[in-house]
Image (spheres, rainbow, N blue to C red):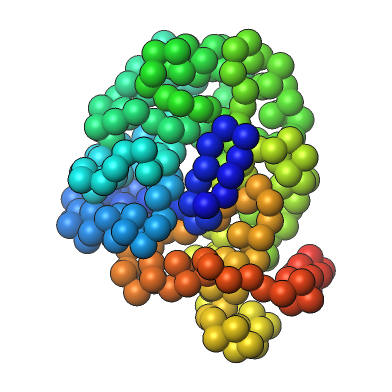
């Protein structure tokens, strides 16, 4: 587990993009498989689950809600997101209540999915009221840069922004500034698409390093992410074997020399 000022969270989070459908479109064809995968992830110790109202037009949240039944709720950390078109105060409240109903529980971390034309202070005001109502526990931002996070932080009256979720990977280090900002501020940095849709699997450098630890290239990459103080990678997997491989990134550490070798090599690409 990674410990932050406000909460603890598993070192890897399960992503649900593509479960239950796509961009505001619903698909029930893989429901049984997806529910099974979510359950298995929790059993393996991946207790942080990332979803959004947009994923499958809310159906991904419904699948998460079904899958988590029978597990101790306090052991889970459920993250979901409100779409920027719903960033007005009343719409945020409405969306959060709908997400909570689909999940069948409160929301641990509620994020604004993308920057919106709505004044950020209006959205933050809704987030704070949702905390007071017990609908959400914490709130944060997704696809925001440090300057935008600072601006949003100025809007807070009672609670703090605790997390940011952005794209970051060994191949795409363009968000390094936000990673460093999160480290400095003690924020949780959730990294989506960290293995670049499987591209890491065939990476020669990571595969060679993995031989030393008897680990796969994906496990090496995920372990590299895990060692960043504030970063938790979000990895989507519906395949049980892939879930088990992802969990194999936990419980060991790249030595300092190998970690730096990876860091320096991919920062120059």
Q: Is residue 118 visible?
A: no
| Residue under the point 72% across and 57% down | 173
Please name whichever residue, 251 or 64, is drawn nearer the observer in this view of the structure.
251
| 221 sits to left or right of 92 | right
x then y, percent, for residue 244: 38, 71
| Residue under the point 53% across and 80% down | 216
x then y, percent, for residue 138: 51, 27
| Residue under the point 73% across and 44% down | 183
- Quarter of the image with the C terminus is bottom right
x then y, percent, for residue 18: 35, 53
Q: Is residue 224 visible?
A: yes
The image quadrant of residue 145 is top right
Compared with 110, 238 (above or below) is: below
Compared with 192, 244 (above or below) is: below
The image quadrant of residue 73 is top left
| 268 sits to left or right of 232 | right
Tally of numbered tags? 0
| 18 sits to left or right of 161 | left
Please name whichever residue, 88 or 42, is drawn nearer the observer in this view of the structure.
42
The image quadrant of residue 104 is top left
Compared with 105, 24 (above or below) is: below
| Residue under the point 34% across and 74% down | 241
Please name whichever residue, 22 or 221, is drawn nearer the observer in this view of the structure.
221
């Amino acid at each position: 587990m990674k410990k932050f000022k406000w909460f603890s969270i598993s070192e890897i989070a399960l992503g649900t993009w593509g479960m239950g459908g796509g961009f505001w479109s619903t698909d029930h064809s893989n429901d049984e498989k997806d529910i099974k995968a979510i359950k298995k992830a929790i059993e393996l110790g991946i207790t942080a689950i990332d979803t959004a109202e947009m994923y499958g037009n809310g159906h991904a949240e419904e699948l998460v809600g079904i899958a988590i039944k029978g597990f101790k709720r306090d052991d889970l950390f459920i993250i979901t997101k409100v779409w920027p078109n719903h960033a007005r105060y009343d719409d945020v409240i409405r969306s959060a209540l709908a997400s909570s109903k689909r999940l069948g529980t409160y929301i641990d971390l509620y994020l604004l999915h993308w920057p919106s034309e709505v004044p950020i202070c209006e959205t933050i005001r809704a987030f704070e009221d949702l905390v007071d109502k017990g609908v959400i526990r914490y709130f944060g931002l997704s696809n925001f840069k440090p300057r935008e996070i600072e601006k949003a932080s100025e809007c807070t009256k009672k609670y703090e922004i605790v997390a940011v979720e952005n794209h970051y990977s060994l191949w795409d280090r363009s968000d390094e500034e936000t990673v460093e900002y999160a480290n400095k501020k003690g924020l949780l940095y959730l990294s989506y698409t960290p293995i670049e849709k499987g591209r890491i699997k065939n990476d020669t450098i990571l595969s060679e390093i993995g031989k030393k630890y008897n680990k796969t290239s994906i496990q090496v990459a995920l372990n590299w992410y895990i060692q960043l103080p504030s970063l938790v990678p979000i990895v989507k997997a519906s395949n049980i074997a892939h879930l088990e491989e992802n969990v194999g990134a936990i419980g060991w550490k790249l030595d300092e020399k190998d970690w730096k070798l990876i860091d320096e090599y991919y920062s120059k690409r």
